[in-house]
Amino acid sequence: MALRHDMKFVKSFSRYEPAKLGYGALVGCLLISLGFLVLFKPYLSPLPISNLRSSMRAGLSMLIIENTGSSQRIESKNLQEQKTKCNLSDPRSDLCEIEGDIRIHGNSSMVFVASSEMGILARNESWKIRPYARKGDLFAMSAVKELSIKSLIGHEEAPNCTLNHNVPAVIFSIGGYTGNLFHDFTDVLIPLFITSRQFNGEVQFLITDYKPWWIIKYNPILKQLSRYEILDFDRDDRVHCFKSAVIGLRCHKELSIDPSKSPNGYSMYDFNEFLRNSYSLERAAPIQIGDGLGKKPRLLIISRKKSRSFTNEGEIVETAKSLGYEVVVAEAGVSSDLSKFAQIVNSCDVMMGVHGAGLTNLVFLPINAILIQIVPFGGLEWLSRTDFGKPAVDMKLRYLEYKIKMEESSLIKQYPRNHVVLRDPLSIHKQGWLALRSIYLDKQNVMLDVGRLRAILLKALELLHH
């Protein structure tokens, strides 16, 4: 989304002209103006000194634009220390941070920044933002409401406040791909933690594309991040006034956090600890085999029904039991009670499942537990590691991988062996995400070679000894 700025006053200068030329010209004009005032003072009516100071300060207000390629990072200030910072260069999400006289009218999707001074911010500028952390995905963003941010000259142009708030606002969307557990965490919950945890609950959430069932499902997380009742941005016809607001959410990467980019250096370890507190999860670490307590390690198998299901699930369970595991089989459906499922996951030491949204439940595993990801046939190693392999390591889990061979995939019954789907998966990748997903994710089930699986399960037991 491009920010529209009227930059006519700099058109005559080359983009490579030194910045000091502009400042020199401005200072020169001010000095000449002062000279005329001194020379012709006897012939002029008195000029209030407060007006002169105001004029000088307004002239020195600054708009800083740091070019970062196709997008920009904008920072605007005016006399009243109102400040707007919009980072439009991040590949994951657009984010605006505003301080000052902020008036929010959700029903019209408008955020007003009011100013009584004629600084650069107060030039009736406006820009638009979709507050959802997957901005490169046009399909996802088509389901996210666009908000307008508009700066105003004079308080008389701003709508009157209906409600004044003493805490900051965070405005975000739960449109896009929400309803899918992976996207709920990657696109909303983890970015919301990064953005709002620093306020220690003293923050007001305003949610656009509001879904009541989503709020209920994630209420344990939301109420830990904000002590205030969530506002339905789209249906609220009141004007909410704030002194500071964040529009959009910070997002670093899939299902993870980059501590170097997050406020106060938050990491995925901090997020996992936060989740354990939110859901009252008791276990912070898995069992250690050989500790003398004689407990069996618990293996959770994430079951799937529609696609990427285990066609020999019973054989897999028996193999695990023969190695000394206590086995739990559970399906992580959309309608699952997340609080109860979190307790099940946290009670286990090893979690295993085929690549898919159900593996997102790894966020509830104890630190140093083990994730075994079954990677479907079709050159999906990069996707599997990006979505769950690397995040697992960031969460201080141990990560193991089982790659499906062609003979273990149900695709071998759907296509002849010399078909491009089996012979050259990367050529299907080149056709785009929809082609890849429809074949290798939506149409594929797996039958694990229990001999190969046995070796992986033994490796997990070995890790639990340390």
Image (spheres, rainbow, N blue to C red):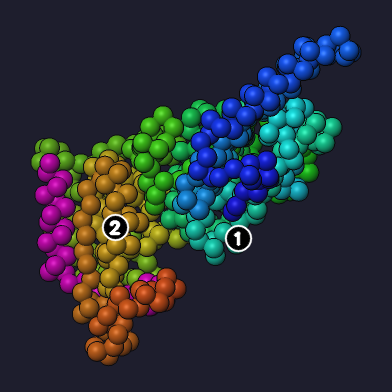
The one of 442 and 329 positioned closer to us in this rendering: 442
Magenta span contains residue 465: yes
Question: Looking at the magenta stretch, what is its main secondary structure?
Answer: helix
Q: Nearer the viewer, residue 34 or 262?
A: 34
Percent across and percent down for residue 283 are 30, 38
Tell me if residue 414 can be seen: yes
**Residue 353 appears in the figure:** no
- Look at the picture and state if 298 lies above or below 329: above
Q: Distance between the residues labelled 2 and 1?
A: 27 Å
Residue 55 place in picture, x, y as percent? 74, 22
Q: Which residue lies furthest to the front in this view?
A: 39
- Report the front residue among 277 and 17: 17
Report the residue marked by disc 1.
143
Which image quadrant for residue 63?
top right
Circle 1 packing at 10 Å, graded few (<14), some (14-19), many (20+), is some
* Image location (x, y in percent) of residue 54: 74, 19
Three-letter code, disc 2: Arg
Q: Nearer the viewer, residue 90 or 166?
A: 90
Q: In which quarter of the image is residue 153?
A: top right
Residue 448 horizontal side relative to residue 107, left or right: left
Q: Is residue 120 above or below residue 137?
A: above
Q: Image point 68% across, 34% down: which residue?
A: 121
Q: Name the residue under label 2.
A: 385
Magenta stretch: give its range: 437-466
- Report the quarter where the C terminus lies: top left
Q: Which residue is drawn at 59% across and 53% down?
A: 1
Q: Is residue 406 magenta?
A: no
Q: Where is residue 124 in the image (x, y as percent from the top left)?
A: 74, 40
Mark 2 crowdedness (10 Å alpha carbons): few <14, some 14-19, many ≥20: some
